């Protein structure tokens, strides 16, 4: 049942784009997704959530302003969610210029398209805890100073400040969600959580013997992506646009994650975990821990899935995939 609202999602084929599409479709939105024709089968996440046929895809690219203007005109969107990005931190050292163009300039292109076509539309920018980088406080909130430690964090910080600038300069309803790490069975295989869940499933099935990782002492605040897309939507329902930290307020090490995942299938992490120096980053972010007090108080949002439940969900999904 349509509620007459139209939403445009960039990065619709990514983890967050798929969960947000499902969430908005359930609320009766017409959902349009920007589709950059770069990869092979990029629609598997939408298919896995059963929404592939319900999302109306529009060809376009964050680096091409003309295509974004056309996407705004075609979709007639009243809500625009900019989730598109080169989102793998490790790759940003290999492709810093591309990352700056897609993640930084790309966000400005979307803001420009909104300003030109429909300045009444509400805009969401996918900011990231990676902007905090070399942390200045034990827990990071909306007032914590930024010190990004990767080309990805630097590009995202450009997009974040551009969102603030368009809000202040053009009075756009533009909000940023500073999301801490959020994962799911739809996470790309290159990310550490999925590398762990896939590796554990393969080891349990006798397909490999070891799991090779880099810095297992890195601490992150991990939540479930399906919970976090609700916070995005809630930001655009507020009277005034603002920025919000979205996190669980609890962090764990990569080693903790391995222990939960291996224990779930009756194995001991220490028997299979191998530390490989080639996976260490040029500049490491050692600890991130979010303070979501503002999002909880103002948006009434709270995470539903725990870290342990998340890892079990991911291992089970990879187990089914590999066996199937």
Image: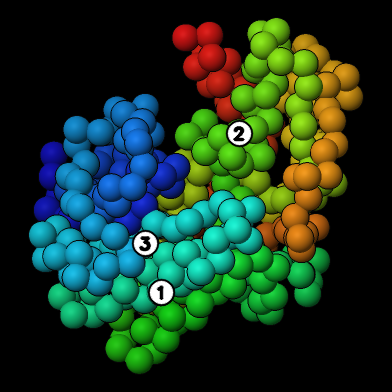
Q: Secondary structure at mark 2?
A: helix
Percent from the top left, x then y, of residue 166? 36, 84
The numbered dot on residue 105 is: 1
Percent from the top left, x then y, of residue 35? 27, 50
The residue labelled by disc 2 is: 194
Q: Nearer the viewer, residue 317 or 224?
A: 317
Percent from the top left, x then y, of residue 43? 32, 35
Q: Residue furthest right?
A: 270
Q: Is residue 311 above or below residue 209?
A: below
- Horizontal relation, residue 196 to residue 224: left or right: right
| Residue displayed at 20% across by 52% down | 59
Q: Earlier in the sequence, mark 1 or mark 2?
A: 1
Q: Secondary structure at mark 3?
A: strand
Badge nearest the viewer, 1 or 3: 1
10 Å neighbourhood of mark 1: few (<14), some, or many (≥20)?
many
Q: Is residue 188 above or below residue 261?
A: below
Q: Earlier in the sequence, mark 3 or mark 2?
A: 3
10 Å neighbourhood of mark 2: few (<14), some, or many (≥20)?
many
- Horizontal relation, residue 16 to residue 265: left or right: left
Alpha carbons under labels 1 and 2: distance apart = 29 Å
Q: Nearer the viewer, residue 95 or 183?
A: 95
The residue labelled by disc 3 is: 82
| Residue displayed at 68% across by 30% down | 196
Alpha carbons under labels 3 and 2: distance apart = 23 Å
Picture quadrant where residue 66 is located: bottom left
């Amino acid at each position: 049942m349509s509620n007459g609202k139209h939403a445009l999602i960039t990065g619709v084929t990514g983890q967050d784009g798929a969960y947000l599409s499902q969430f908005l479709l359930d609320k009766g939105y017409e959902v349009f997704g920007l589709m950059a024709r770069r990869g092979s089968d990029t629609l598997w996440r939408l298919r896995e959530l059963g929404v592939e046929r319900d999302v109306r895809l529009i060809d376009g690219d964050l680096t091409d302003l003309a295509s974004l203007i056309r996407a705004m005109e075609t979709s007639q969107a009243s809500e625009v969610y900019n989730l598109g990005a080169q989102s793998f931190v490790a790759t940003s050292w290999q492709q810093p210029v591309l990352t700056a163009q897609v993640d930084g300039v790309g966000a400005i292109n979307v803001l420009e398209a909104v300003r030109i076509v429909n300045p009444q539309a509400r805009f969401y920018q996918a900011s990231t805890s990676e902007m905090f980088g070399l942390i200045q406080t034990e827990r990071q909130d909306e007032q914590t100073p930024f010190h990004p430690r990767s080309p990805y964090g630097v590009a995202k910080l450009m997009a974040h400040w551009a969102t603030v600038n368009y809000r202040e300069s053009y009075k756009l309803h533009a909000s940023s969600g500073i999301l801490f790490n959020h994962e799911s069975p739809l996470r790309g295989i290159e990310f550490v959580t999925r590398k762990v869940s896939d590796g554990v499933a393969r080891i349990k099935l006798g397909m490999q013997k070891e799991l090779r990782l880099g810095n297992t002492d890195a601490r992150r605040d991990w939540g479930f992506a399906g919970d976090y897309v609700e916070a995005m939507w809630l930001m655009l329902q507020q009277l005034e646009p603002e920025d919000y930290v979205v996190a669980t307020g609890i962090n764990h090490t990569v080693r903790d994650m391995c222990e939960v995942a291996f224990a779930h299938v009756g194995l001991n992490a220490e028997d299979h975990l191998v530390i490989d120096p080639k996976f260490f980053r040029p500049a490491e972010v050692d600890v991130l821990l979010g303070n979501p007090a503002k999002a909880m108080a103002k948006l009434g949002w709270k995470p539903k899935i725990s870290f342990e439940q998340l890892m079990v969900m991911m291992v089970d999904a990879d187990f089914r995939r590999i066996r199937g």
